[in-house]
Amino acid sequence: MKRTLLALSFAISIVLLLAGCASAPTAEVTATKAAITEAQTDDVQTYAPDSLTAAQNDLNKATAEIQTQDNKFFLSRDYKQATEMLKSAKDLAEKAKADAQSNKMKTKADAEALIASLPPQMDEAKKALAKAPRGKDTKADLEAMQNDLKVAEESIAEATTAMTGEKFKDALAKATSAKEKIASVIDQVKAAQEKAKGKGRR
């Protein structure tokens, strides 16, 4: 009788131990959600949105896995995979913050360098436009190119303002747009000059 009770007591202990090991990682879920919430800053959403999305995706997968295990018989539940996903999600949230800082500094440096390179390019474009072939058939093209340079100058001013406001991504976009406009004008003038030379040889 004593042996039977002892065996039963041992079996119950094992069952309780297994049940305890198969508990949902509630604390880990809370910690991971907090880490992701903390990472949802303007800088992260601007400069490292992919890293933040990856963290949220892993959290969603972990939550789904926990739900799957919750629906199983308690002795067959296994939250190991969910726990690993939660750790990954938390690590990605931390990585998102680091990525954002790194990407922000790179974007700042790129924007500064590009903005600094634009004034001489603008001067080159204006000089080229001044030497562009004139005629009835080029009037509309010349006006369009003059307007492009005006838009480029406005973009440079907006880029400079964005830099002052530490909106480096916007500054880089504005500066890139200005560079493309300037390069387009220079290329168009060269093409017009080549075309004029071709007519002159006839």
Image (cartoon, rainbow, N blue to C red):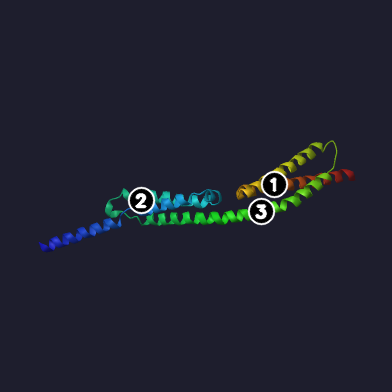
Looking at the image, tell me whether mark 1 or mark 3 is earlier in sequence order: 3
Q: Quadrant of the C terminus?
A: top right
Q: Which residue is mark 2?
A: 66
Q: Who is closer to the viewer here, 55 or 14? A: 55
Would you say the residues marked 3 and 2 are in contact, meaning their CB atoms lie under 8 Å apart? no
Residue at 45% of width from left, 57% of height from top?
91
Q: Spatial distance from mark 2 to mark 1, Cα to Cα? A: 52 Å
* Element type where label 1 sits in the image: helix
Q: Spatial distance from mark 3 to mark 2, Cα to Cα? A: 48 Å
Q: Which residue is mark 3?
A: 112
Check disc 1 and give the amino acid type: Ile
Check disc 3 and give the amino acid type: Glu
* Element type where label 2 sits in the image: helix
Q: How many marks?
A: 3
Q: Position of residue 35 (x, y in %)?
A: 44, 53
Give residue 156's mark: 1
Would you say the residues marked 2 and 1 are in contact, meaning their CB atoms lie under 8 Å apart? no
Q: Position of residue 137 (x, y in %)?
A: 83, 36
Which picture quadrant has residue 200?
Answer: top right
Give residue 142's mark: none
Q: Who is closer to the viewer here, 67 or 201? A: 67
